[in-house]
Amino acid sequence: MNILIVDDDIGLLDQLKAALKRKHYGVETAENGEQALDKIFDVPYDLILLDIMLPSMDGLSVLREVRQAGLDMPILMLTARNDVQDKVKGLDHGADDYLSKPFSMAELMARIRAVLRRQGNRTPVLEAGGVTLDTVTRKVTQNNIEVHLTSKEFSILEFLMHNKGSAVSKFNMAEHVWGENFDPFSMSNFVDVHIKNLRKKLRVSGEDSIIKTIRGLGFIIEESL
């Protein structure tokens, strides 16, 4: 399994390379967009970790050229925490997923596994308990009926489905959805309100919500769903 990491932060590049090698992935690196394209068009990578903010040619331009060339390997975009528009542009241009900086190595590994599993299924759709979420079209359905979510509700559901089977703390979820704009003092009930509304929209008559509360820990969508 060969992975290309594209980032101009040499320290982060070395850290990611070492971590992925410990997981027995083959790893190559590139420090700018032009170098990345040279390698991508020369070697068939199984996955690309692509930073958006790159010198000379940014990550979105690299992504666009790769997709226009007909290459369909999964690409996970690395973005600044509050760059919502860049995330949307990345998904629109064919990115398979995104991860906001700074991120934990555990979350990165989970995202990589999820992206590679989806690539094996040839679909960017996440599923749980009759609910499907398309990370590219940003469409959510339940039992084949479309569910209309706000952007925050979508981000919360996507985060929970990416972490299916693992408990997600309220604070980590808030950081992911609101980024640096989240104030734990003035916005402490924001997650609870959005979870409540999301549960209402996803509740099927006679059935419990797929989103479970783990008292003292946070929320979870169970692996068995």
Image: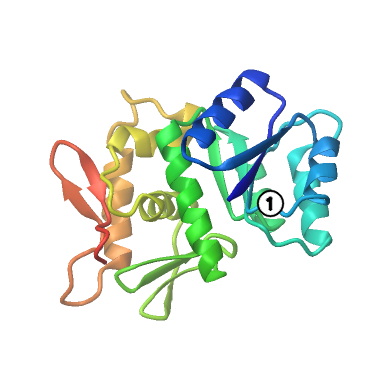
Horizontal side of residue 177 vs 62, given as left or right = left
98 vs 151, nearest the viewer: 98
108 vs 139, nearest the viewer: 108
SS for dot 1 = loop
Looking at the rendered structure, the number of numbered marks drawn on it comes to 1
Question: Which quadrant of the structure image shows residue 51?
Answer: top right
Q: Position of residue 123 (x, y in %)?
A: 55, 69
Name the image quarter holding the C terminus: bottom left
Q: Position of residue 138 (x, y in %)?
A: 54, 62
Q: Give the labeled residue for mark 1.
A: 45
- Seen in the picture, residue 219 relative to 225 is either above or below; the reply is above
Is residue 167 visible in this depiction of the protein? Answer: yes
Q: Position of residue 95 (x, y in %)?
A: 65, 53
Q: Position of residue 65 (x, y in %)?
A: 83, 53
- Seen in the picture, residue 105 relative to 43 is either above or below; the reply is above
- Seen in the picture, residue 52 relative to 148 is either above or below; the reply is above
Q: Residues within 10 Å of mark 1 (few under 14, many from 20)?
A: some
Residue shown at the point (28%, 47%) measured from the top left: 166
Is residue 83 visible in this depiction of the protein? Answer: no
Residue shown at the point (33%, 26%) measured from the top left: 184
Residue shown at the point (76%, 29%) measured from the top left: 31
194 vs 120, nearest the viewer: 120
Horizontal side of residue 178 vs 190, given as left or right = right
- Seen in the picture, residue 102 relative to 25 is either above or below; the reply is above
**Colour treatment of the image:** rainbow
| Three-letter amino acid code at the position of disc 1 | Tyr
Identify the residue at the far top of this view: 11
